[in-house]
Amino acid sequence: MLPELRLRITLFLLLAVDLAAAGELPVFREAPAFRNGRECPKTTPSTIHVAMTLDATYLRGSVAGVFSVLQHANCPENVVFHFLANHRRAELRRTILTTFPYLSFRFYRFDPNLVKGKISSSIRRALDQPLNYARIYLAELLPPAVRRIIYFDSDLIVVDDVAKLWTINLKSHVLGAPEYCHANFTAYFTPKFWSNPLFSTVFSDRNPCYFNTGVMVIDLEKWRQGKYTEKLENWMRIQKRYRIYELGSLPPFLLVFAGNVEGVEHRWNQHGLGGDNLEGLCRDLHPGPVSLLHWSGKGKPWLRLDSKKPCPLDGLWAPYDLFHHAPLFSDS
Ligand SMILES: *[C@@H]1O[C@H](CO)[C@@H](O)[C@H](O)[C@H]1NC(C)=O
């Protein structure tokens, strides 16, 4: 081996060890440029606003999500991403810039102190991360000019034109999402909640159904006017004191919106695909067409694919994985 090459390899190895120790963010391949078709309107009302959170743990999922939206949009240049992050914002911004050099996006600082005192521990630690609650603050964080937003979790891929979701008619509602009225709604709250009429009467004039907060279309104007952030925060305060539910940021949304949601076609949130990888339980798709696949639950497709024990549907996520599998890291 040439001494020069040997030196280079040594330096590279040292660097790699160094990066791993520093908890360096994953590195991604550069996504191609996605250009609008000729039929795409050029005026601002056709802009599609999408909000997602970014953090080190879910970055690979977020990047795949963005990639999937662009790949299936007829007018990808009309999509503007709004990224919310609390830690390591400069690094995350650099990752987005280098992975998607042509992307329209804005970065926002989500201050974890906004929610730290309001979070009570749930049955799953992953649900207690402050960033999980960022979706409650979209109306405050995004500029007033953004009047509608699609919120996407970081463990999903979109396999249809996001414009179809964007243009749904919310009618009089603040929020649109697929509803699941067969789910046992009682189970989302504790007996303490149901036995106290002060709390449980919140649903007395509604027919509440479960909905998943990982995919939501929100009218931010109505949200701001109706002070919905405060309404959600009020329930979080009640939770701190009385423990009226066991999960994280979902129950406050159910308390405020369930029964007042504009039902979106189920194809826009085929959720639960994460299942429970600790027990090797793989989920199947719900019957019907699919526009969005959502790996909610404990298992994440990138972890299962890396461990070489994927669920069958994880293969549908893999083509959107831009993670750069450097040979150096693959066997370590
Ligand atoms: C719904 O959940 C509650 C609380 O977990 C339980 O007591 C009840 O039996 C369930 N109802 C049905 C129809 O499964």
Image (tube, rainbow, N blue to C red):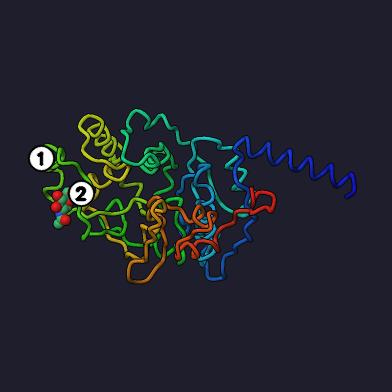
Residue displayed at 27% across by 35% down: 236
Q: Foreground: 146 or 287?
A: 287
Q: Is disc 2's CB within 8 Å of ligand 1? A: yes
Does residue 6 lie above or below 36 as drawn?
Answer: above
Which amino acid, mark 2? Ala
Left or right? Give the position of 310 relative to 175. right
Q: x%, y% of residue 11? A: 78, 40
Q: Is disc 1's CB within 8 Å of ligand 1? A: no
Q: Foreground: 152 or 227?
A: 152
Count the labels in the image.
Answer: 2
Disc 1 crowd rating (10 Å Cα; few below 14, some 14-19, many 20+) is: few
Residue displayed at 53% across by 54% down: 307
Q: x%, y% of residue 69? A: 50, 60
Residue displayed at 31% across by 38% down: 122
Instruction: In the rendered structure, find residue 195 and report the number of the disc placed on it.
Output: 1
Q: Earlier in the sequence, mark 1 or mark 2?
A: 2
Disc 2 designates what residue? 187
Q: x%, y% of residue 48? A: 46, 56
Q: x%, y% of residue 145? A: 43, 46
Does residue 131 lie above or below 272 as drawn?
Answer: above
Circle 2 sits in a helix, a strand or a loop, which is it? helix
